[in-house]
Amino acid sequence: MGEAVGSTRYTPRERTHYRTKLQENLETFDSYLQKAVFVAKGTVGLEVEFNLIDEEGEPALRNAEVLAEADDGDFQSEIGAYNVEINLPVMRVRDHGLAKLEQSLETRFAALRKAASAVGATPVSIGTLPTVTTELLENEAWMTEENRYKALSNAVIDARGEYVGIDLDREDHYTHEFADIAPESTCTSMQLHLQVAPNRFADVWNASQAIAGVQVAMAANSPLFLGRRLWHESRLPIFAQSIDTRTPELVHQGVRPRVWFGERWITSVFDLFEENVSYFPPLLPESREASGTPIATDGGVPLLHELRLHNGTVWRWNRPIYAPGGDSAHIRIENRLLPAGPSVKDMVADAAFYYGMVSFLVNENRPVWSRMTFAEAHENFENGARDGIGARVSWPKHGTLDVTELVLETLAPQARVGLEQLEVDEELIDEFIGIYEERARTGRNGAWWQRKALDALSGRAAVGTEERAEGLRTLTRLYAENQASGAPVHTWELPSA
C-alpha cells in the first residue's frame, strides 16, 4: 500500500483484466525464483509510524503541514491525517550497526519534532493514541487526502458490503460500527525489514512466526483504544477488524481474513505469494498499464506490478516482499507486528531481539518449528496480544510458562548468541539485550506503564466522564515527555495518584 494509485474505485472489466495479469505475474515469479540470482546481503531496515498531538495531548490533524515543513523524502504520510511515517535507510547490524540504527532513528525523530513544532504539533510514537475518540473517527477529516487511502477504504467497504464493526473487551468493552476503515488509523507500528536469500526465506519466516507471540507480549504498547482499557496490544485485533472484508457469515464459513497470521509453516517464499493469489480477491485492481509501470527494469528484472500491489493488500504479520531494481532483485521479510514506541532505545532493543533470535533459530540443527505446532505459535500470538508482558506462552521443552521467564532463562541468551553470529559489537549486545532483559525482570513495558499511569491519574473513572478524558490527556502528555527523555520504558516513573 506504499504505492500511489490513480482511482478510488474500479470497474468489473478492470477487475477481470487484473486477475488475469495477477496469475501471469505469479507464473513469472515462479520461473524467476528458479533461475535468477538475487541480492542477499542480510541488510536490515526500519519504519516507524507516529501520531501527532496538540498541546493538550489530543490528535492534531496536521500531517500535510508537517510533511511540507520537513520536506524530507524519509518522511511519508499515513492513512490518518494525524499520522506520519519515518523510513530509515538500509544498513547492516554487524559491528556497530545497532548504534547506527539508534542514531539514525534519533536524528529523524528530532527532525520530525522540529517540523511538527513549527505547526503546533508534537510527534508521539505509540501503538494506539489514547486520546483518539469515536467522534474524530466519524469525522471525514480523519483521513489523509490521497487516492490510495480512499481507494483502500472504498475497497474494504465494497467487498464487505456493510459497515466495519469493532468489538473488543477486557476491563472495558467497546463496540461500534464505522462507515469506513477509520479505526485502522489508530494502529501505529514499527516494522522491521530483513533481506534474505530466497533459499533461506522459509526458515526465516518460520522462525519469525515462532517468536511472534513473545515479541508482541514483551513490546505491547497499545492498551487504550478510544479511552477504553482493552488488550495490552489492542492494535492487533483493532487492525484486523478494521480491514476485515468478511461478513459474519463468511467468518463462520471459515473464509480467511486479510489480516492474517497464517495457518502453516512454509517451505518456500513462493508459498506465501501463491496463497495470496489463491485465497484473496484483489482489493485494488489497478493494472500495470493504468499505473504507467513498465514490465521490467532496464536490467530485465520483472517488476510484477500486479503481484506486488496485491501483496500489499494482504496484511500478514510477517509479510514477504519482492523488491526488483536495476539488474537484480531481492527478497525480504517485513516483521509488522510490533507497536511503535515507547522510546528509541526500546525500539532498537526490540529490533536487536528479533534479529538475534532469527539468526539463532535458523542455525539450529533441529529448528523450533519442527518441534512446535503452528497452532501453538498462533495461540502464543493471541496470548501475547491479550495479556502483554503478563502472558503465558508455550515453548518446546518448557511447556507453558510466563513469557518473562522464557525470555530471561532461554530466549535472551539465545538472542545474544544470534547477534554474536551476526558479528554485532559485544557492548551493543549487552546494552540492547540488557534493556530487553530488564523489561522482563521488572515486568514493565509500554502497556504496563500506560495502564498504571491511567489508574494513578483517574482511578476507575467511568468511560466517557471528563475525569477519564482528562486522565487520558495528561497520560499522553507525560508519555511524550518520557519518550523525549530517551530513557527505556522500564525506568519511567509513574505519576502521583
Image: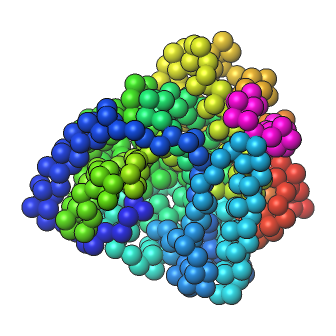
Task: Check the image and name the residue furthest to the bottom.
Answer: 119
Query: What residue lies at 60% left-to-right and 59% top-to-bottom?
Result: 89
Q: Residue 193's x, y, as percent?
A: 55, 47
Q: Residue 296's x, y, as percent?
A: 28, 56
Residue 265 in sight from this viewpoint: yes
Query: What residue lies at 65% left-to-right and 47% top-to-bottom?
Result: 92
Number of on-image labels: 0
Magenta stretch: give its range.
415-439
> In the rendered view, does 16 fall on the left or right side of 361?
left
Based on the picture, tell me whether residue 423 belongs to the magenta stretch: yes
Q: Residue 231's x, y, as percent?
A: 60, 46
- The coloring applied to the image is rainbow
Q: Residue 222's x, y, as percent?
A: 63, 53
Classify the position of the N terminus by image quarter: bottom left
> In the rendered view, does 146 fall on the left or right side of 67?
left
Query: What residue lies at 77% left-to-right and 52% top-to-bottom?
Result: 99
Classify the position of the C terminus by image quarter: bottom right
Closest to the observer, 270 or 231: 270
> In the rendered view, does 155 fall on the left or right side of 65?
left
> In the rendered view, does 14 fall on the left or right side of 496?
left
Query: What residue lies at 31% left-to-right and 32% top-to-bottom?
Result: 34
* Vertical side of 487 occupied by 368: above or below: above
Based on the picture, tell me whether residue 63 belongs to the magenta stretch: no
Residue 445 in sight from this viewpoint: no
Closest to the observer, 421 or 409: 421
Quarter-wise, where is residue 341 in the image?
Answer: bottom right
